[in-house]
Image (cartoon, rainbow, N blue to C red):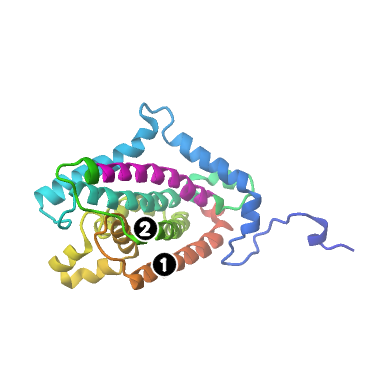
Amino acid sequence: MKTAEERWLYIITSKKKLIDFNFREIWRYKDLLFLFVKRDIITLYKQTVLGPVWYLIQPLFTSLIFTLIFNNLAEIPTGDGMPNFLFNLAGITAWNYFKECLVGTSDTFKKNENIFGKVYFPRVIMPMSIVVSNLLKFGIQIFVLIGFYIYYTQFHTPKFNIFPTIEILFFPVLVIFMALLGLGMGMIISSMTTKYRDLTFLVQFGVQLLMYGSAVMYPMSYFEVKLPKYYWLIEWNPIAIIIESFRGMVLGTEPLEIYKIAYAAIISCVIFIIGLAIFNKTEKSFIDTI
């Protein structure tokens, strides 16, 4: 007599490993993944006047405000021969991708409870679609950064002597680290919000605080000079390391420190694995508590 595994092609069960990232099943649902990605992109600015132009407005205005307040008013230096606006734009561009991945995945269960309660599909596809859809927004902002980079090096008077380093080839690796870190933290928060709704209100506030501690609008060397006692908070912040490394690749501001990149990579992977384990455990019973 055939067993259940032999009789059925697919078996849906809550019994699975704590850390389970079934690539075969995710690939089988790839069409659904692309559908969610398309939904995220289209519905975000649907029925807006400017549409995707908002992708450009937010980093440009934020960089302008940072330049006026932190560089001109507070006189925070960005380095000799470095345009302040371009320095801030590079930091904001990298930060925005991480932030969007974190915030977008932090309410996965709460935002999709109706879908999760009616039909089966690998739940991890939902936060993955957010990470993938944010790549489009990130790509658009990268082109904006390249445009201003060309302006400051070729058309601005005087021209700035800045140049990307050979380490720019490792840029896709940094993007993967940002995605893993944002996805992992987002899945942890999303799992906790099924029981503790207060976290939903704390996410935006916490992300703002994290931005100020992630070397987005100032170089890490400046923080070391001004607050050496607390420098370790910035020095070992993985997203601060990634942002500083990104700026170093693009603008040639600081040489890459391999041991710090390795540390950020390890932390990103560990947080992703922890987030995946908590996410898998929560999805079995979240519908009863949400």
> Is 198 displayed left or right of 162 in the figure?
right
Residue 136 on the magenta segment: yes
Labels 1, 2: front one: 2
Chief secondary structure of the magenta span?
helix
Q: Where is residue 57 drawn, in percent x and y?
A: 30, 37
Residue 183 shown left or right of residue 55 in the figure = right
Q: Range of the magenta residues?
A: 126-151
Classify residue 189 by image quadrant.
bottom left
Q: Position of residue 130 (x, y in %)?
A: 47, 47
Residue pointed to by mark 2: 168
Q: Earlier in the sequence, mark 1 or mark 2?
A: 2
Q: Quadrant of residue 174?
A: bottom left
Circle number at residue 265: 1
Compute the Cα span from label 1 to label 2: 17 Å
Q: Which class describes the residues within 10 Å of circle 1: few (<14), some (14-19), or many (20+)?
A: many
At horizontal 46% and vertical 66% (from top left) the residue drawn is 269
Residue 181 visible to the viewer: no
